[in-house]
Amino acid sequence: MGLSKTIWTNPTEYLRTMQPENPVLFFSPQALQAQAKRFIDGFPGLVTYAVKSNPGEEVISNLAAAGVRGFDVASPFEIALIRRLVPDAALHYNNPVRAKHEIAFAVAHDVDSYSVDSASELEKLIAMVPAGREISVRFKLPVSGAAYNFGAKFGATVELAAQLLARVAEAGFKPSLCFHPGTQCTDPAAWEAYIRAAADIVAASGTTIERMNVGGGFPSHRLNGVVPQLDATFALIDRVTGEAFGDARPSLICEPGRGLCGDAFVLADRVKAVRDGAHVFLNDGTYGALNELMLIGVIDRTTVMAPNGQIRGGAPVPRIIFGPTCDSVDRLPGEVMLAGDIAEEDYLIFHGFGAYSVATNTRFNGFGDLQLATVLSTKL
Ligand SMILES: *Cc1c(COP(=O)(O)O)cnc(C)c1O
């Protein structure tokens, strides 16, 4: 995806001037760096970035410039990407199932920390990773609060986690714990449950931990009525860690993806047609940058803009929105409230769209020519 060298004032200036027929993601480096500083200043520990949420080189470089020095990586490709862009960064390989060739690649690239959630995968690490490295046991709880459940695939039970932690220490590695409360987790109570369970796991294991990773899951601003309470969440994590661990308090790591990159981007899609005055067809859909809406639901932070840059102010009407491909799956979930005077060739703008958008965009059916434009501000 090409990044133009021109820096535009805001998305409106670009849309009015360029009249793009392809979907455009507007990126504000200033907004990204400001959000990184918010995390670095506010989170009571080390801030790392989950590369999968948006692996764009402009994202990685701006996070590094803002002071992010650690990255959560899940594959040899992501390891190589970070080693190239931020050579001295700490790499946390937090994908708990790895082929042997992937472990060998990580060892050769000096990965600092590995997560694990099963006995078989732990034995693979013990056999291949130099002793003394950190191995972090990932556990899960049946708690809610997130947009969807991250425990369905990864995470040991509390009982297994205590056994794995003991085995990590016995084999000569640094034991640690990690969890992920689920993405877009708007209920800070999820972290409280996990941190208290972590203290129980450590007690049951007979070991101590120097560090604990409290995951990603920090929300971005997706819904008008749900503004992320980052500072309150940081304060809760700090307080509960102190209460649960007392004198044996571990240092903390977080690994946000969406919470860091989401609000630094705005997506603009063009209306191809309003079919017989009812269904809205976009030049982008669930095979493109809107893929994630199928999983975590529609976003209501949207704006309809006429080709001349005017914001449409018609009374909102519920609409079915289809993407451009010939696949009937290519439809946004439910109905979306859009300005009633929306018209063909307008732009439908989705705010806070930096996470899981460019990363999952495909060229299915010949669509998905997603372009990136740099703006000073994502405000329209
Ligand atoms: C995806 C992922 C993250 C980032 O999740 P967000 O919800 O985007 O913050 C962090 N850690 C791990 C292990 C992940 O798989």
Image (cartoon, helix red, strand yellow):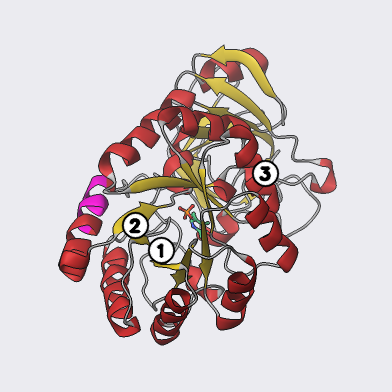
Left or right? Give the position of 135 relative to 282: left
Residue 294 against residue 65 in the figure, above or below: below
Helix, strand or loop at label 1? It is: loop
Distance of label 2 from label 1 (alpha carbons): 6 Å
**For the magenta stretch, what is the residue range?**
231-236
At horizontal 33% and vertical 62% (from top left) the residue drawn is 210
Kindly identify which residue carries mark 1: 146
Mark 2 burial class by Cα count in 10 Å: few <14, some 14-19, many 20+: many
Q: Amino acid at mark 1?
A: Ala
Question: In the image, is the residue at mark 1 within 8 Å of ligand 1 by its beta carbon?
Answer: yes
Distance of label 3 from label 2 (alpha carbons): 32 Å
Distance of label 3 from label 1 (alpha carbons): 31 Å
The tag earlier along the polypeptide, 3 or 1, is: 3
Tell me residue 257's x, y (percent): 48, 48
Q: Amino acid at mark 3?
A: Ala
Kindly identify which residue carries mark 2: 186
- What mark, if any, has residue 80 been given in the picture? 3
Mark 1 burial class by Cα count in 10 Å: few <14, some 14-19, many 20+: many
